Structures are given as structure tokens and as C-alpha cells.
Amino acid sequence: MRVSKEMQDINSIFQVFSNMQTERCKLRELENRDVDNLFDIYKDEETVLFQGVSSIQTKDEVQEILQRFKVGYEKEYFVKIGIEEKVSEKLIGIISLYAIDRLNNNLKIGFVLNREYWRKGIMSEVAKPVILFLFSKLGINRLEAWVHPDNIASVNLCKKLGFTKEGVFSKIAINTRTNKYEDRICFARLTTGHYEGVCAQ
């Protein structure tokens, strides 16, 4: 796909999300003030069950996670977009953009949300404008989401966001908690579709 002059380069992915918001949330960079809220997310066994990692036990581990996120961002390996609830100004989740393939304009997207906010349509609400922006402004060719087969909520989210199931890949992802390889479903989007969302400029 040839990117028009109106579009930004895929490398702009590292700067564009700080002004994006929806009815209930705004997206922003992760900050040191988010330690307590990140701890609430990653200490919960049910929240990280399908993330392939162990729950964390201390806030020192959160500091280490934040440092890894910072290094990954600075080296332009991936982007971690914080989801802040407007009313409480509380960080309640993260959208991850990673495996960025600049040659082919492809990347992957992942989600994690504080369990207290599940089943409220929040992740769908914030993911829609992000996906719309990726396709309409950055000229993304292909967006993938790799989901654990038992993660029914994420499977349903991908379908709601217009992703197509392309297949199940056997033993493709290591679970560092169990030290076992797990299957993943590959979902993909190639077009933007029609979304309602707000991209504040």
C-alpha cells in the first residue's frame, strides 16, 4: 500500500496517541504515578491468566515493568498506551502495539484491563479509534491479534472489532508461568470498517 501525503509514516506510531480520547477514557503515556494502578492490574491472577506471565507480588516489580516499557518505547520496539478513566483519572488498562514490521506496514495489538472494568464495553470503546487511526492515518496494511483459545472475552472482542479468524497456531507461544507452549488464534484486520470513536487532534 502506498502511503499518501495525508498519511503519516508508521514510525509516527510512537507519538500519535497522547491526544486521543473517547466518551469515558483518554489514552496517554504510562507514567511513574501509575505504579499503584499497574500493580492492581498485574497482581490479579485472573487478569493475567491468558497473558502468558505470572502475576506480580510487589510494586518493585511494577517499577521494573515500567522501565522495560520505557526502553522498548525508546528503542521503538513497541508502544504501551495507557487507558485512563476520565472521571477517576485512574489508569485502568493498556493497549499494546508490537511486532512492528516497517517494511510491510504490519503490526500486532494486545489488550489488558483491570478486572473491575470488565464487561462494560471499555476495551471495545478505546480500541475502535486506535484501530481507525492505524489504518486511516498511518497506512497500516495488516493488524493482527493473537489470542489464547480459552480467552473467550478477547475472542469476542476481536470479532466485535471486525477481525477475521485466520487459524489456530499450535504451540506457538511460551507461557513463562508454566514453562509450556500454548496455542494461539490469529485474528487479522486488513481494512478499517466503520467505527464510531473520537480522535482528538
Image (spheres, rainbow, N blue to C red):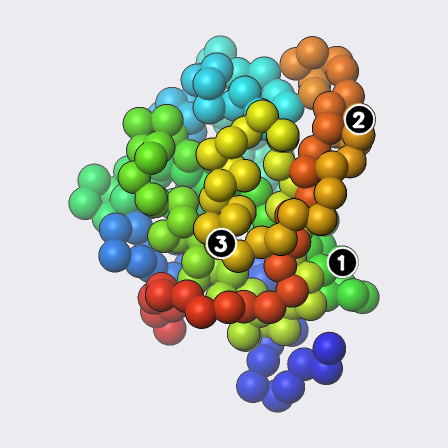
Q: Secondary structure at mark 1?
A: strand
Q: Which residue is mark 2?
A: 171
Specify the quadrant of the image occupied by residue 84. Answer: top left
Q: Is tag 3's residue or tag 2's residue first in the polypeptide sequence?
A: 3
**Whether residue 36 is situated above or below residue 3 in the rendered picture:** above
Could you tell me which quadrant the C terminus lies in? Answer: bottom left
Foreground residue, 110 or 190?
190
Can residue 170 be seen in this snapshot? yes
The amino acid sitting under disc 2 is Lys
Q: Is residue 168 left or right of residue 66?
A: right
Tag shown at residue 101? 1
Amino acid type of disc 3?
Answer: Leu
Check if mark 1's residue and mark 2's residue have beta carbons within 8 Å: no
Residue 42: where, in percent of width, then height? Answer: 47, 23
The residue under the point 35% across, 32% down is: 118
| Residue 198 image position (x, y, % from top left) | 34, 66
